[in-house]
Image (spheres, grey):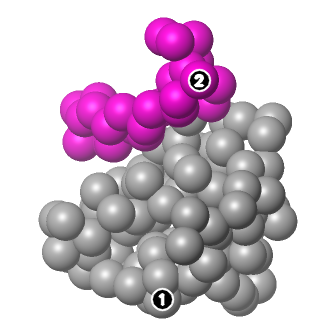
Amino acid sequence: MMIKFIPYDDGGIYVMKALENEKELGFCTFTVSGFDMKFETVSCSDDIIIEGLARAAMNFAANRNAYIAKIKSEHMCAAFKRLGFSGDNEPSVEIPEALTSGCSCSHEKPY
């Protein structure tokens, strides 16, 4: 099955949902302000889905001129570390750097 990542605006806070056959697998919420985007919540138990949500949200934010992604430290997990987030109080990463980092899933590359 294919997992879809669907964004929507919830009154100024963006939501990115991960869906498989209309079943919600997880979501994150984030804001975009100037060149910054910030993950406010992350709700998912699967690390690979979290990485997909983060990548989709950062791509969405980058298309709205965001360059730096930040996350509340309590939501920091292995998926965000793999994407390059670092720092203590408010871990962050440059979005282009995070989006060009290699996929960590176990799928083989088609080339």
Asked if residue 71 is positioned above or below residue 50 in the image, the reply reads below
**Residue 16 in the image, given as x and y percentages of width and height:** 43, 39
User: The N terminus lies in which quarter of the figure?
Assistant: top right
| Residue at the farthest front position | 111
Q: x and y percent of residue 56 in the render?
A: 43, 53
Check the picture and name the quadrant holding the C terminus. bottom right
Residue shown at 57% from the left, 51% from the top = 52
Q: Is residue 17 magenta?
A: yes
Mark 2 — residue?
A: 1
Range covered by the magenta-colored residues: 1-26
Q: Nearer the viewer, residue 57 or 73?
A: 57
Seen at 73% across and 76% down, the residue is 82
Instruction: Say what secondary structure mark 1 lies in.
Output: helix
Give the left or right position of residue 7, taking residue 74 as reference: left
Amino acid of disc 1: Glu
CA gap, disc 2 and disc 1: 29 Å
* Location of residue 54 (image quadrant): bottom right
Question: Residue 71: in sight, yes or no?
Answer: no
Question: Is 66 above or below relative to 32?
Answer: below
Q: Quadrant of residue 28?
A: top right
Number of numbered callouts drawn: 2
Magenta region includes residue 7 = yes
| Image disc number at residue 17 | none
The 10 Å Cα crowd at callout 1, few under 14, some 14 to 19, many 20 or more, is few
Q: What secondary structure is the magenta-colored segment mainly?
A: strand
Amino acid at pointer 2: Met
Residue 83 appears anywhere in the view: yes
Q: Label 1, on which residue?
A: 97
